[in-house]
Image (cartoon, rainbow, N blue to C red):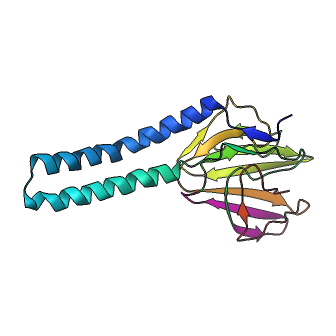
Amino acid sequence: MPNFIYIDIHLLNRIKKLQYKAQIPALALLVLSFLLSFFFATFNMRYPSLILSIISLTWFMYVSACFRMRQKLPIPEPGQVLSPITGKVKSLKRSSDQYQLRLVKSFLDVVEIRCPHESAEWEGNALRVVFGETSLVFRFDTDNLIRFPEQEMQPGNVIGMISGSAVCSLNLSQSLMTALKPGDICDGGQTQII
């Protein structure tokens, strides 16, 4: 029995195609800067061409950084509720009968959304998990959410992606305590929330 969960090769190809599509404008800008320096070989056009080249290479590297991902991770223990995204615990607010946990994903964090529990189901831009008698809802606040509904809902599997930054919030009842506190780093599909 394997000790790791590997990302499906078809899913990896799909994510990489999205990355390449996002990098096309940066490459077009680089080509434009070379054409400017070639056709207008005067001293006045060298600096604008150089500036365009630097901007396009920076843009290209930025998009590459936004599509980082882990291709394998250890198989999680059954029965746990895991963090669906990689990020930092921004806040853990307490009200009279519940907690609100907010995870913040920066643009440099990995893009994948991992299945947090075997009972997880997509509901629009939210992920519902039935844990015992309680229903937990992970809400994703982003415009860049892409779901992969054909993927099997097994803990740790890639079930979606978010390129760029995002916020994931979860409301927990008082009976479900979490060991996480503000400032903690969560790894998607590995860090135990409950």
Q: Residue at the location (32% across, 57% down)?
A: 55
Residue 191 figure quarter: bottom right
Residue 122 figure quarter: top right
Q: Residue at the location (49% across, 35% down)?
A: 17
Horizontal arrangement in the rendering, residue 13 relative to residue 39 (left or right): right
Horizontal arrangement in the rendering, residue 115 relative to residue 24 (left or right): right
**150 or 99: nearer the viewer:** 150
**21 or 37: nearer the viewer:** 37
Residue 101 highlighted magenta (yes or no): yes
In x, y percent, where is residue 79?
90, 46
In x, y percent, where is residue 105?
61, 58
Q: Residue at the location (66% across, 42% down)?
A: 71
In x, y percent, where is residue 170?
74, 56
Residue 36 highlighted magenta (yes or no): no
Horizontal arrangement in the rendering, residue 70 relative to residue 136 (left or right): left
Horizontal arrangement in the rendering, residue 39 relative to residue 188 (left or right): left
**142 or 187: nearer the viewer:** 187
Residue 75 figure quarter: top right
Q: Is residue 123 visible?
A: no
Q: Which residues are magenta?
A: 90-108
